[in-house]
Image (tube, helix red, strand yellow):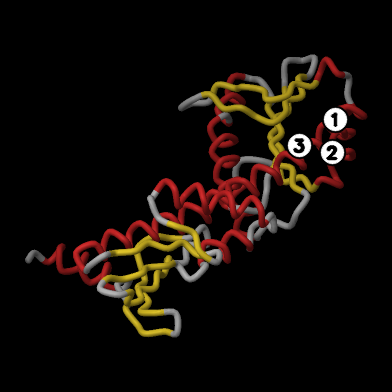
């Protein structure tokens, strides 16, 4: 085996942790929850075969992002159907008739558990951004003429076209681009990419202001990242910010 293979095998072996617990033999997999915590599954002897479950890990991870129990239940059922496994007592469960099917059962449960948690996060981020966009639009309508406000405004970036939540088009050709930002890496990453890809427009002699608007606390690291490409504007400061912008 080559040195590279030895290093890769050693790195991967950190995840292949097997230990006995009250829930069964725990296997730490390579699948990840949105928090980047590895997904663990539990293997229990069941007749001549095995029963594999996630110990409710998907539900616990999803619960940290939103408390919509019905929605999480639907996501669980959807992923269980996709991976041809079952849901039992808020846990994803697969049955392996013998050892030959055990690896497939472990992979199915781990992938379904991670997918459920990620889908729950996506849903929560979307709902959070939608609520914030409604607030932003109300402020824009009270401060600006309707003709200056564009919703879901598309701008050509250096690499592709990006859709911004709002644009304020000023009479001199300059514009303000606004995006609602939620305190989650999905939202932060998407808005960072969009803002950074349109910075070049300023070199054409057109002033383009970029505001990332939030109404929930952002991590210091996320603020530092976004500040490289946009101004960070708390929701409560948006009215004053628009007033100053119109005076420029």
Asked if disc 1 and disc 3 are in contact, CB closer than 8 Å, the reply is no
Q: Residues within 10 Å of mark 3 (few under 14, many from 20)?
A: many
Q: Is residue 162 above or below residue 181?
A: above
Find numbered disc 1 in the image and state the secondary structure of the residue it sits on: helix
Asked if disc 3 and disc 2 are in contact, CB closer than 8 Å, the reply is no
Badge number at residue 238: none
Mark 1 vs 3, N-terminal side: 3
Q: Which residue is mark 2?
A: 241
Q: Which residue is mark 1?
A: 140
What residue is rendered at 57% in x and 42% in y? 192
Q: Nearer the viewer, mark 1 or mark 2?
A: 1
- 52 sits to left or right of 148: left
In-front residue for pair 71/224: 71
Residue extending furthest left? 1
| CA–CA distance in space, label 1 to label 2 | 11 Å
What residue is rendered at 77% in x and 15% in y? 172
Residue extending furthest front? 47
Q: Which residue is mark 3?
A: 133
Q: How many marks?
A: 3
What residue is rendered at 43% in x and 66% in y? 39
| CA–CA distance in space, label 1 to label 3 | 10 Å
In-front residue for pair 197/106: 106
């Amino acid at each position: 085996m080559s040195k590279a293979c030895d290093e890769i095998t050693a790195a991967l072996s950190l995840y292949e942790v097997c230990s006995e617990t009250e829930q069964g033999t725990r296997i730490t997999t390579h699948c990840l929850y949105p928090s980047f915590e590895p997904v663990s599954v539990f293997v229990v002897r069941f007749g001549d075969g095995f029963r594999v479950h996630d110990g409710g890990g998907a539900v616990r991870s999803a619960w940290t992002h939103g408390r919509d129990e019905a929605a999480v239940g639907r996501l669980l059922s959807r992923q269980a159907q996709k991976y041809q496994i079952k849901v039992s007592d808020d846990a994803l469960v697969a049955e392996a008739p013998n050892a030959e099917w055990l690896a497939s059962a472990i992979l199915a449960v781990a992938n379904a558990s991670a997918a459920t948690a990620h889908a729950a996060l996506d849903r929560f981020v979307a709902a959070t951004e939608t609520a914030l966009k409604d607030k932003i639009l109300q402020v824009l309508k009270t401060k600006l003429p309707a003709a200056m406000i564009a919703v879901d405004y598309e701008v050509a970036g250096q690499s592709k076209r990006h859709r911004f939540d709002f644009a304020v088009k000023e009479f001199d050709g300059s514009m303000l681009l606004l995006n609602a930002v939620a305190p989650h890496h999905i939202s932060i990453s998407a808005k960072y990419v969009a803002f950074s890809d349109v910075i070049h427009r300023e070199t054409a002699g057109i002033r383009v202001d970029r505001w990332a608007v939030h109404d929930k606390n952002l991590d210091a690291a996320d603020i530092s990242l976004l500040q490289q490409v946009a101004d960070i504007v708390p929701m409560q400061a948006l009215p004053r910010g628009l007033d100053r912008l119109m005076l420029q």
